[in-house]
Amino acid sequence: MKRVDVAIVGGGLVGCATAWRLSTAGASVELIEAADINAGASGQNAGSLHFQIERRFLENGDALAEQASSIVALSRIAVEDWRGLETALNADLHVSMAGGLMVAETADHVALLERKATREQREGLKVRTIDGDAARAIAPYLSASVLAANHSADEGHADPRTVTPALAAAARAAGATIRTHSAVHAIGRRAGGGFTIAGNGFSLHADQVLIAAGAWTAALCTLANLHMPLYPVALLMNATERTAPMVPHLVQHVGRRLSLKQTHAGNLLIGGGWPSRLAQLPGGGFDLSRRATMIPDSLSGNLRAAIDVVPAISRLNLIRSWTGVTAISADQLPIVGQVPRMPGLWIAAGGSAFTLGPTFARLVASAMAGGPSEALDIVSPARFEHLNGFMG
Amino acid sequence: MADILDVAIVGGGPAGQAAALHLAGRGLDIAVIDEQPRPGGQILRQPPASFTVPGWLAGRGYARLKHQLARFEALDDIRWLGGCSVLDLAPTMDGLSLLAATPGGISRIRARHVLVATGCQDLAVPLPGWTLPGVMSAGGIQAFVKSQRFIPGERILLAGTHPLQLIVAEQVVRAGGEVAAILFAQPRAGMIATAMRHPLIALRRAPDLAAAASAMATLRRAGVPVRFGAPLHAISGMDRVTGAVTGMGEIACDTVGLCYGFVPQSALPRMAGARMHKAGPAGGWACAHDHWLRSSVVGLSVAGEALGVAGAAAAAAGGAIAGIGIARDLGLFAPEQAERMARPHRHAFDTHRAFAAMLDSIADPTGHLPRPDAETLLCRCEDVSFETICGAIEQGGSANAIKLATRCGMGACQGRNCEPALLRLLGDVGRGDDPGFTARFPARPVAIGDLAESG
C-alpha cells in the first residue's frame, strides 16, 4: 500500500497551502479532494483580507468579543503572510492591501467601534478611529451617513479564483500528489501509529492526517470517531457588473452585515454574512450536496446596506448572486491544530480561512514537523476535548 | 393582484398564448409575463404600439399564429404583464415564487402553477472576427426586420447550417435589403438525403417545405447566391465588418448573420432545480417532462422551445397540452375529459416534433462549426479567449471549475452564450457528461437600487 508522511483531506486554500509548505520542506504528501480544487468556500468566498475584529464577534456581548479578540494575534501574522505570498508563489493573486474601513452609522455603532479599536490596539494591531469626514477624505465614495470608521492600513482583498489553484500548482511542483474527484470513505488508526485513508479506488497509509474540508470537516471527523463542533452556514454574495475603479478599500460595517470591495476585474462584490437556506435531508439534517436557496430578505437587506454606505452602487447592475458554504464552530473561533486524544490527526476549519488560511497552513505544516505550535493555541481543538471524552 | 395566482405563464409567444386560451374563462387568477411590451414572442414580434408597420408579417405561414394571437389579445380575464423580466424562479411550500423586474420596480409573484414558455435563442458561434460590430445572429436580424422593417446593414451575408437563414434572407430582400449570399456549411446532397429518409414527416409539413422553396425562388429572382458546402471561416474588418473569409473565397459585406441553430432559454427551470437533459444538436438544455409537460419540480410545467427547439407550431400544441394539464391538476377537468381535449394537440405536437427532429438532423452544426483561433473570445462578457479556456480544460475540471478558473460565464449573460461552446469543447475531450454551469440568480442583470429593500 502507498505510504505518505501526510494525507490531507480537502482541496481548499488551507489544504493546498499546507501541501505546498509540507512538500517544500521535503515531506511526502497526498491531498485528496472530493470535487475539484477550490470548489468549496475557498473559491466561493468574496476574497476579503480582513484583519480587524469581525462584526460577528462583536454582536453577542462583551464576553464573546473579549474571547474573540485573541484572534487578532493571528491576524497580525496573517498580514505578513499575505504580503509575501505572491512572491513566494511567483504568481499574480491580485492581492491588494490598500487598507480597510469598518464604518459606523449610529452613535451606538461608534461606541462599538471605539471599544473594538481599544481591544485591537491592546493586541498590537494597527487600527485608528477616524470621524466621518476623515473617512470620506480617504474614501470619497462613502455616504454622508457614515459617522466614523476604524481604518486599518493593511486590509484589502485577493482573488479567491486564483489563490488556491496557485497553491495547488506550487504543491504539485514541490512533489505533492493531488487527487481530485475522490471522496474519502474511511479514516482508520493503525496499530503502532499512523492512519489508513481509503476512498473509491484508493487507500493509503499516512503518518499524519490533516482534515481541512470546510463545511464537510465535521462529517469527515466522524470517520475517525470524533465529534467536532462545526456547523455549516450558507452565506450570500453578490457581484455587480464591472465598472471603473471606485472602491480601492475593503469596506465593512461594525453594526450591519456588510463587506464590500472592488475586484481586480472591476466587479463590486457585496456580502457580509447574510444567510441563505441550506438544503435539508428528508429525515432531518442538512444536505451539503444540494444547492442552498437564496432568502429574498437577505438579498434586499444586503444590497440596502451596501447602498446606504456606498450610494453609487445603486445604479450598478447586479449580475450574479451565489452562496458559499462554510462552517462555524461552537465558539465562533476557527478550530486548527492537533486533536489531543488522537496524535497525528490535525484539523483546520471553522471560518476566516481565506484571510487566515495561509497562516494556518504555515503553522500547521511547521507543527506537524515538530516545530513550535504556540501561535495556534487559541484555536486548538483541545478546547473541545471534553466533547470527545467518550469518542476516539 | 391575488396573493397567490393560480397560474403564472412566463412567455407570451405561441406556447404561452395557447396555454392561456385553455385556462381563461374558468375563474382562475392568471398572469402572463413577457419581456416584450406586447405579446407574440419572437415568431410574431410586434412593432411597438406607437408604430405602424404596413403588411406586418403578411406571409401565409404566419396566419394561424396571428389568429391565435388575436384570440389571446381579446381575453379579458388574463393579466398581461408586458415589459417584465423574470429574475428568479424557486419552488415554495404551496407553489412557486417568481421575482420579476417590472416597469414599476421589482415585484414578487407567487403562483400555484407556473408554465415556463420562454422560447429559444440563437446559438452563439465563436469564430475569428465574431465580436466585430456588424456580426449578428440571424434571429437578431430577423427581429429588426419583423418588428420595425429596419434592415441592420447595407449588404448582409448569412452563414450557417440552419435552413431558417433562407427565410431571414427572403424577409430582408422583401423589405428592400441586399443579401450578399447565403452560405450553408454542409453539402446540399446530405440535406436532401436526410429529408428523403423521412418522406412522411416531410409531407405532413409540406407548407413549410413550400415556404422554403418559395424563399429559394424569391432569392434566385433577386440574384442572391445560395451556396452549399460553403463554410464560413472568419469575419474580417478593423472597426467593423468589411468581409468574410469563406469556402467560396472572400465575400465583401458589412453585416454577417450567423445561423447555426437554436438553444432553449433554460435559465428559469434550471434555477428552479428542474431535471434537464441535453437539447438538440445545437446544444443547450431542455427540460425533462411527463405526459402533461410537467417538469420534475412540483407545479412547474414547460412548453415551447424550453422542451427542445421545435418551432412555433409544436410550441402552440405543447402550450395547449400544458394548459389543459394545469386545468386538470386544478380540478377543472376530469382526467378522461382532459385526455380527450388534449388528443388533437398531442397528435399535432408529435407531428411537429418529428419534423423538428428531421430539421435538427438537416441543420446539425456538428462538424460544420467554424474553428476559433487562439485569440477568439469564447466568453465575450468577460473577454476570455479560446486559448485560455483550452488551457483550463487541460487542467481537468468541470464547466463550473473552468468558470471559476477563467471567468468564462461569469458576466452579464450568465453563460447563455458561451456555455454551449464550452460544453462542446469538453465533449471533444470525452467529458460530454458535464452538467454545465450552476444557474445563478438573477436570470437577467438588474439594477442594485431596484432590488434593495426600501431605504
Image (tube, coloured by chain):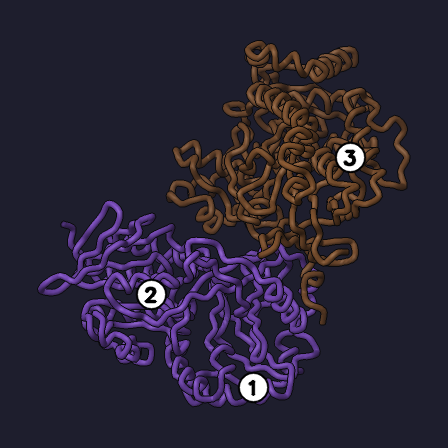
Q: Chain of mark 3?
A: B
The three-letter code of the residue at mark 1 reads: Thr
- Residue B36 in the image: state x and y as whole percent: 76, 43
Q: Residue B220 location in percent, x, y?
A: 75, 11
Q: Earlier in the sequence, mark 2 or mark 1?
A: 1
Instruction: Report the side of A59 relative to A205 (left or right).
Output: right
Q: Chain of mark 2?
A: A
Mark 2 vs mark 1, CA separation in Å? 39 Å
Q: Is residue A306 above or below residue A60?
A: above
Report the amino acid beneath label 2: Ala
Left or right of A215, for residue A22 = left
Disc 3 packing (10 Å; few <14; some 14–19; many ≥20): many
Q: Residue at x 68, y 38 (%)?
A: B333
* Mark 1 crowd level (few <14, some 14–19, many ≥20, 10 Å Cα): many
Disc 3 element:
loop
Please, what secondary structure does the residue beneath circle 1 have? strand
Write the residue at 51% across / 89% down.
Answer: A115
Residues at marks 2 and 1 on the same chain = yes
Residues marked 2 and 3 touching at CB (< 8 Å): no
In front of the other: label 2 or label 3?
2
Q: Colour of chain B?
A: brown
Residue wearing tag 1 = A129
Q: Label 1 lies in what chain?
A: A
